Image: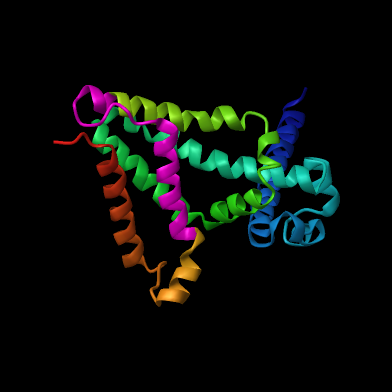
Amino acid sequence: MTATALATDETRGHDTDATRRNILDVATREFADKGLAGARIDEIAEKTNSSKRMIYYYFGGKEQLYRAVLEQAYAGIREREAAANFEALPADQALAAHVAQTFDYHDRHPEFVRLVMNENIHHGEHVGHIEGIKDRNRTVLAFLAAIIDKGAASGLFRADIDPFDLHMSISALCFYNVSNRYTLSAIFGVDIAAPAAVDRRRARVVEMIVASVRRAG
């Protein structure tokens, strides 16, 4: 193969990656705002640098595109967790840093929260069909188990903490601040999304989670 042909193939590869990313980014916004039923391939195509034909070529159809969007959304939070290397910190600091990062991810990616809410409307019908997603999401439980063991060994944490229960508590507190921000703001007249309010809530969530696992006395 000539140098020109190699360069052409490389350019096509970059173009393909860029096109897929563009489609996924636009589709993420559309599915997050309108759900699976409300989003339309025609509208997604109009807002991309591609076409309806290319969407079907890359993803196969609307449901396959939706599942690709879900996969990317979950991969985003898991990849950040894996890259953080909080395991090197003392157990209480590692847990606090993990909670803070989780809170920040939800706050900065409200589309992730809306996608999860939409998928729950469908009873998790689609997320369970995404190859590898269960294994990928087990990494957070392995991380929490290691931190719990480390904290228990040092006398900081109770030894009876279940990693899945802890993950649920962290997710619930971080999720709620985004999922209910508009209703809370409307009912109580508090701007939940204001930077100062977000900072206060973030600190409180970290404090509550770490306190919940500490050993008494």
Choose between 89 and 44: the one closer to the eye: 89
Whether the magenta-drawn stretch holds residue 159 is answered as: yes
The picture places residue 172, in percent across and down from the top left corner, at 45, 49
Name the foreground residue: 181 vs 212.
212
Report the residue at 40% width, 67% height from top.
Answer: 192
Q: Is residue 80 above or below residue 175?
A: above
Q: Is residue 37 left or right of residue 74?
A: right
Rendered residue at 69%/61% (across/down): 34
User: Which residue shows up at 42% across the image and 51% down it?
Assistant: 174
Residue at 76% across / 25% down in the picture?
A: 2
Applied colour scheme? rainbow
Q: Which of the two residues, 197 or 118, is positioned nearer the viewer here?
A: 118
Going by the image, does 28 lie left or right of 177?
right
In the displayed orientation, state which residue is furthest to the right. Answer: 53
Q: Position of residue 60 (x, y in %)?
A: 82, 41
Count the marks.
0
Q: Magenta stretch: dominant SS?
A: helix
Q: Report the span colored magenta.
A: 150-178
Q: Quadrant of residue 187?
A: bottom left
Of residues 127 and 41, the one nearer the viewer is 127
Relative placement, left or right, of 109 versus 8 is left
Q: Quadrant of residue 131?
A: top right
Side of 32 where 47 appears, left or right: right
Point out the residue furthest to the left here.
217
Residue 43 drawn above or below residue 211: below
